[in-house]
Amino acid sequence: MNLLPVLPQIVPLATAIVALAVRSHRRLQRGVAMIGATAHLGVAVWLFSTIWATGPARVQMGGWSAPFGIVVYADTLSTSLVVATALVHFAVTGYGIAGADEPRRRSDFWPLANTLVMGVQGAFLTGDLFNLYVWFEVLLISSFVLVAIGNLRAQIEAAAKYVVLNLLSSAAFLVAIALLYGATGTLNLAELSILLREPAGVPMISGIAVLFVVGFGIKAAMFPFGLWLPTAYGSPPAWLAALLAGLLTKVGIYTFLRTGALLFQEVVPWFDDVLLLGAFASLLVGALGSLAQVTLRGAVVHSVIFAVGFMLMGISTGSEAGRAATIVYLLSDMVIITALLLVGAEVERVVGSDRLTEMGGLYRQRPLLAAAFAATALSVAGFPPLVGFWGKVAIFGAMTDSGRWPGVLVALAGSAVVLATIAQAWSLAFWRGGSRPLASSVSSPTRALPIALLLLVIAFASLVPNPLFEVAARASADLSDLAAYRRVVLE
Amino acid sequence: MEASLAIVAGIVLTLAFFSLLRRSFLRLVVGFMLLTNAANLVIFTSGRLTRGMPPIVPVDAQTIEQAANPLPQALILTAIVISFGITAFAFALAFRVYRTIGTLDTDQLAETETDAVGGERARGPDGTLSA
């Protein structure tokens, strides 16, 4: 049995254990974290290239054949997300070993960051609903502590809200799993995809789907369930928020994609419409919320809700092209938002404040930082020819193809508002003359390198978007080909 | 048996939501304990409940018709362990809320909402902007 698909979970787990064992030696612990993140990225790329060459694969844990055992399933969609996650993990670890402040150096930060990543990878790679629930809990518990480390009032308030809403989401998810098991007798996604499409149907499927949408909606930060996000991502340090914002809501989007294709689209008639409404609301709330912020970070974290709206819109088309467009957006957004928050962390560090009114003069004094901000922020707004633009154009194409062109207008309006936000942030923080001296003048190469790496990825995907589209098309084909999924898992 | 347990689960769920809607953070945590227990009861009920029939397949048979399904009970074990850990964390967080903010009234947890994310941020002991 080839255990390669399990390695992206094993490596962070091993890193977490070793980092915990050497917790009294902080320099050693940081070294372990960096080596672990590098190995993780290597394993992820290895898995992706293997799956790309051989097609989807599955591992039956404990040798129990599906649908009785737990299935780990790797296709192009899962493995491309695994690579993006490993890249985010690598960049944030690189920044963090140099940029970590005292509370996060002292505490068990590195083990927790690694268990968080393990949970994310587990959720991407599982083929079983209950196993998905377990991985969700793994990543949630880690993120709860990561948000609260440091014990500032803002963090404790944010953690309280974040914990409450996400526990509610887990409970809804768990009850939905119980009802679905009671109705079908299985939690294997491949077998469920067969049973749900039988002509007799499954009792209560609409009610079960409501619980799933609520559960996943809270995790993905879909409006009106996403209001935990601005404080939870706004109160820990920006580079840590980069890890959370780069990964957590993306897992929610992935579960909507996967369970939408396998279980709900075509089965539950209202599923796409509810997703579309949630998408519109998230787009507008995210964009307008972003415009209303007085801090740079506030503007950035609200744009995460905006991006969630865009991706939900792509999923709600229910077509293979729409899914491919969503995957393009999802993969690029993971890198973009992480890069933007790392740049934001540098800006906060250099200025000594994150309030836009206190910034100024950065364009003259930090031209490289200004350029990095412009590139990442304009990517979020979807300014051509940056990579964010390609994802948006693809989603617009899928929307008009499925006759939902009014949605394009809503999305364009939202994008215009986000562009206005960025123009405002640019003119306040970078363009106008500085009124006060910068707090910190030292720029360390260890902090700059991870940002440069992410910018390089963004630049490549912007100028040569074909490989990204090719990966997304293949991922969408793997996702939409239910017969192949069942064959791989159940044979 | 299933019907009565389903009703019990419904009652526990009602109590859980009643607790969740109270303003004290501690009651909220109690609400969560009830909520996860209600969810576990639903899982338990979904696996068919029969008295005095161990789910052991006889040597000469492939399946057994009436016995309770043991798999949901295994799922509950996992869910119980997870909810145990989360409850412990939630209580620790409740303690932290009380220590840091000085109250358990959830309406008082709104300071960071006033200007969305920032506003007057707390500064760390070394004077650096910490959030």
Image (cartoon, coloured by chain):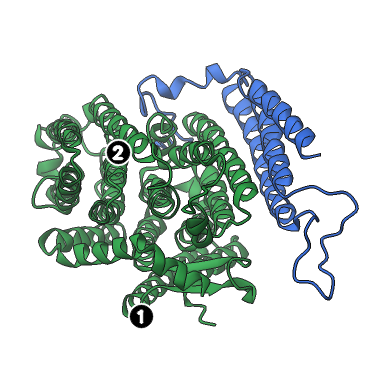
Chain colours: A green, B blue
Return the chain for callout 1: A
Q: Residue furthest front?
A: A199
> Disc 2 and disc 1: Cα gap in Å?
34 Å
Q: In this orientation, does residue A28 appear? A: no
Quadrant in which residue A62 is drawn: bottom right
Q: Residue at x 77, y 36 (%)?
A: B5
Dot 1: what SS?
helix
Question: Which mark sits nearer the N-terminus, 2 or 1?
Answer: 1
Question: Tag 1: residue type?
Answer: Thr
Q: Which mark is residue A8?
A: none
Question: Tag 2: residue type?
Answer: Gly
A8 or B117, which lies in front?
A8
A431 or B5, which lies in front?
B5
Total marks in image: 2
Q: Quadrant of the C terminus of chain B?
A: top left
Q: Position of residue A264 (x, y in %)?
A: 43, 47
Dot 2: what SS?
helix
Q: With A41 as the anchor, is A2 left or right in this view?
A: right
Q: Residue at x 53, y 55 (%)?
A: A132
Q: Position of residue A420 (x, y in %)?
A: 14, 31
Q: Residue at x 56, y 35 (%)?
A: A168
**Residue of label 2:** A309
A50 or B91, which lies in front?
A50
**Residue of label 1:** A54
Q: Nearer the viewer, mark 2 or mark 1?
A: 1
Residue B70 versus residue B104 in the image, above or below? below
